[in-house]
Image: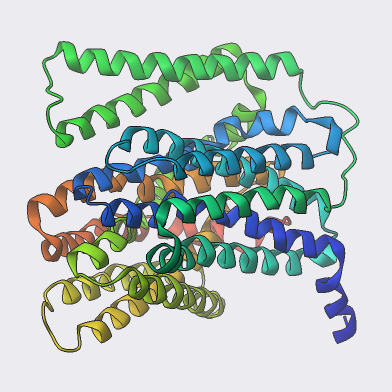
Amino acid sequence: MTLSNYLSVFGNRRVAIVLLLGFASGLPLALTAASLQAWLTVSGVDITTIGWFTLVGLPYTFKFLWSPLLDRFEPTWLGRRRGWLVLTQLALAAAIFAMSLLDPVASAGWLAVFGVIVAFLSASQDVVFDAYRTELLQEDERGAGAAVTTLGYRLAMLTSGALALIIAEKFLGWNNTYKLMAALMGGMALVTLFGPRLALPDGPRSPAGQELKGFLAMLAGALLGYWLASRGLALLGVPTDSKGWALLYLVAEVTAGGVLALWLARQMGFPALLGPLDEFISRKGAWAILALIIFYKLGDAFAGSLTTAFLLRGMGFSQTAVGEVNKVFGLLATLVGAVLGGLWMVKLGLWRALMLFGALQAVSNLMYWWLSISGQHPYVFQIMVAAVGVENLCGGMGTAAFVALLMTLCNARYTATQFALLSALAAFGRVYVGPASGVLVDQLGWSTFFVYTVLAALPGLLLLWWLRPRIDALHSPSNQSPQALD
């Protein structure tokens, strides 16, 4: 392909809309994560409660459960995929606006509720956008589409992360900043209308009634399992008067709900979900691979779960400084790390890259430990810059290898559903470690906490060492999927 042809690929309407929808996909994430954490911190909410607020991201870990319904049932008035995109974007704008009307101290519960709603709608938008992009782009446009998706997503994270921190501190305050983000999100629905219309499928791949019945059975099982676990612990006399015991309740409720949900889905039939799931589980060593996906970035997730609160409250940096360094510089370091990791992987191979980058991302957490003991050091700001840079650089390298692993694990027949499942499982650590992080910081202090984050990475590295033959086999040429990640 000549240079002019290459540039023309980047300049066509299909790739342009993918760039803008990548921005729409990334915009809500920080509003339920780092920016929300900053808002809670400056409002005086205690660190343990802030840790619990990380659970508003739970829907990202379960998006694979309702993704078959988004695929099967289409609002036909805007063509395939676009109807769901517009609906989720308008609903996101409304939910973010609702958050802007609340006070984090007086209405913390309602803020959490609307945060969960935003995360659910955002995860749904991601599912639809991934499918729309896959079906929209032609084969020679997919590389450009992947590149502009990442660009749009990262620009959105800068907007709702770093830029939001600066605007909130210097100009509007947090409530009005969330109103501004709601307006921006609503504008994305107008952008979607300019996207090319996709033809509706000729016919369903499975009976609509069967899919809906299976989904409702799964939902009923989740609610029943959640209730049974909660009541069972209460009858056993397990207290609920501390957030440490509440964490036990949460783990038991989610586990029981998930097990019963999948059991009922299997009894009633939910083929759009169970087909891809059964194919993966039937592979030799599948459960060990799933454990690796959870544990590989666990130490990194622990260190990153309360970084904003640590820099603001633990170290006393201003919101502007945190926005400029942790969000802007940190994001650039992550991008550089991802590029370096991708290039280095060509020489190292998948398993060696996973091991090396995993070790680096674990050890890099000690940079935050160094910052936490710096106190009134005259170069404490420079130490923060170094800590953020090194940790994000190593984390980006680990992410590059980790995403390569997820792509390698997907069967070409079920790429969309299996990637949604594996990426949701990968988000497990990022979401669930928040409450534990808040409790550990409250009990141990910041410096000891960051030492523990290094130890939390060891199970994943040991599991990776044990699984080397299996991962090497996955990465052999005979096992490569012909379907690329779009």
- Classify the position of the N terminus by image quarter: bottom right
Residue 420: x and y, percent? 58, 44
- Classify the position of the C terminus by image quarter: bottom right
Does residue 416 appear anywhere in the picture?
yes
Q: Is residue 368 left or right of residue 162?
A: left
Q: Quadrant of residue 389?
A: bottom left
Does residue 283 appear anywhere in the picture?
no
Q: Is residue 33 above or below residue 465?
A: above
Residue 55: x and y, percent? 36, 41
Q: Residue at x 40, y 58 (%)?
A: 173
Q: Residue at x 49, y 51 (%)?
A: 178
Residue 455: x and y, percent? 20, 60
Front residue of 280 and 383: 383
For the view shown, which residue lies furthest in the front direction? Answer: 171
Q: Is residue 243 left or right of residue 355?
A: left
Q: Residue at x 34, y 51 (%)?
A: 295
Q: Is residue 354 left or right of residue 362?
A: right
Q: Quadrant of residue 147?
A: bottom right
Front residue of 454 and 245: 245
Q: Is residue 111 above or below residue 257?
A: below
Residue 409: x and y, percent? 56, 51
Q: Residue at x 40, y 69 (%)?
A: 170
Q: Is residue 246 left or right of residue 145?
A: left
Q: How is the image coloured?
A: rainbow
Front residue of 52 and 457: 52
Q: Is residue 156 above or below residue 199?
A: below
Q: Quadrant of residue 229?
A: top left
- Number of numbered discs on residues: 0
